[in-house]
Image: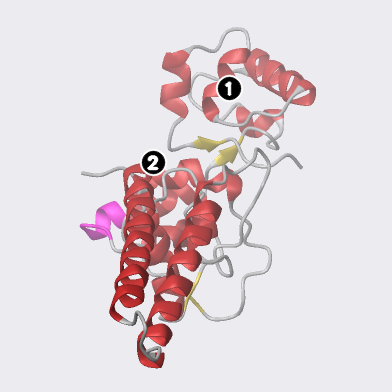
C-alpha cells in the first residue's frame, strides 16, 4: 500500500511528465510548421496543456509545504492541496474529504471525520491538532462507515471523548490510564513551559515512558493550547 508521501511524489512525476509532453509537442509543431502558416488550433492545444502543467506544479508545491505546529485547517473549506498537508493524509484521502463535503457532509467534530474513506482512529489522532471546526456550516454531519455497529460506537466514543493534554485540567488528566495526581500536575507544569505537539512529547514529563504513551493512544490527543 502506498503512503501519502508516495502519492505526492507520483503527483510530482505526473506534473513533470505533462511538462515534458508540452515541450515535445511544441518542438514537433515548430518543425511541422517551419516556413508555413502557424496552426492556431495546435497553438491553442499547446497553451492549454502548458497551463495545466503550470497549475499541476503549483498545486504540488502547495501540497509539499509542511504544516506548522499550531497551524490549523478547516476541513469544511480547505481545498485538496491544503488538506493533503495534514499528517497521515495523502492526495487520495484529501480528495475523499472534498468529495464527502461536496456530497453534503459537514464536519462539526473529529468524530465526523471517520465518515471519510481512508480515515480511521489512528489517522484522525494525528490530524486532530490541525483541525478547526469552529466555522462549520449548517448541514448534515458525515456518517461513519465502520465494519459493524459495534465498531461504530467504539470509534465514535473514543474520538469524541479524546482528552486534550494541552488544555485538560488535572482532574480530567487523571481519568487517563496510568496518570495519577502527581503525573497530572507534571503534565500541566510541562505544557506551561512548552505545549505538546504530539502525544509522544509527553515523554518529556518525568515518570511517563513509551508504554504509558502507548496506553493513551485513542484516548488522548495533543491539540491546541487554550
Q: In this view, does 84 lie to the left or right of 68?
A: left
Residue visible at 39% across and 41% down in the picture: 122
Q: Work out which quarter of the rendered image holds the N terminus and state it.
A: top left
Q: Could you say which quadrant of the image residue 21 lies in?
A: bottom left
The boundaries of the magenta stretch are 146-152
Specify the quadrant of the image occupied by residue 171.
Answer: top right
Say whether disc 1 or disc 2 marks the residue closer to the N-terminus. 2
Marks 1/2: CA distance? 17 Å
Left or right placement of residue 91 versus residue 199 in this view: left
Rendering quarter of residue 38: bottom left
Q: Does the magenta stretch include residue 149?
A: yes
Label 1 belongs to which residue? 201
**205 over 78 or under it: above or below:** above
Taking depth in this image into account, of 25 and 143 the one nearest to the observer is: 25
- Neighbour class for label 2 at 10 Å: few (<14), some, many (≥20)? few
Question: In the image, residue 211 lies at what x, y percent?
Answer: 42, 15
Q: Pick the quarter of the image with the C terminus.
A: top right
Query: For residue 135, which numbered disc appears in the image?
Result: none
Decide which of 82, 206 is in the foreground and name it.
82
At 35% from the left and 85% from the top, the residue drawn is 42
Residue sitting at x 37%, y 91%:
41
- Tell me what residue is drawn at x 62 percent, y 70 percent: 136
**Residue that label 2 marks:** 122
Q: Which of 113 and 95 is in front in this view?
A: 95
Amino acid at each position: 500500500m502506498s503512503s501519502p508521501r508516495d502519492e505526492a511524489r507520483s503527483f510530482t512525476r505526473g506534473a513533470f511528465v505533462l511538462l515534458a509532453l508540452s515541450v515535445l509537442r511544441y518542438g514537433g509543431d515548430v518543425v511541422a510548421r517551419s516556413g508555413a502558416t502557424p496552426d492556431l488550433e495546435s497553438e491553442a492545444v499547446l497553451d492549454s496543456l502548458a497551463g495545466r502543467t503550470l497549475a499541476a506544479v503549483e498545486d504540488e508545491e502547495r501540497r509539499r509545504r509542511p504544516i506548522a505546529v499550531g497551524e490549523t485547517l478547516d476541513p469544511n473549506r480547505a481545498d485538496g492541496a491544503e488538506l493533503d498537508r495534514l499528517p497521515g493524509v495523502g492526495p487520495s484521502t484529501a480528495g475523499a474529504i472534498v468529495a464527502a463535503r461536496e456530497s453534503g457532509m459537514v464536519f462539526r467534530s473529529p468524530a465526523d471525520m471517520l465518515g471519510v474513506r481512508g480515515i480511521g482512529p489512528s489517522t484522525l489522532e494525528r490530524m486532530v491538532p490541525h483541525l478547526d471546526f469552529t466555522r462549520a456550516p449548517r448541514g448534515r454531519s458525515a456518517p461513519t462507515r465502520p465494519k459493524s455497529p459495534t465498531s461504530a460506537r467504539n470509534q465514535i466514543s473514543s474520538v469524541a471523548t479524546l482528552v486534550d493534554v494541552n488544555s485538560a485540567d488535572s482532574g480530567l488528566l487523571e481519568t487517563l490510564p496510568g496518570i495519577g495526581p502527581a503525573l497530572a500536575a507534571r503534565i500541566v507544569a510541562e505544557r506551561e513551559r512548552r505545549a505538546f505537539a504530539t502525544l509522544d512529547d509527553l515523554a518529556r514529563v518525568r515518570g511517563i515512558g513509551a508504554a504509558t504513551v502507548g496506553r493513551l493512544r485513542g484516548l488522548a490527543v495533543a491539540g491546541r493550547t487554550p
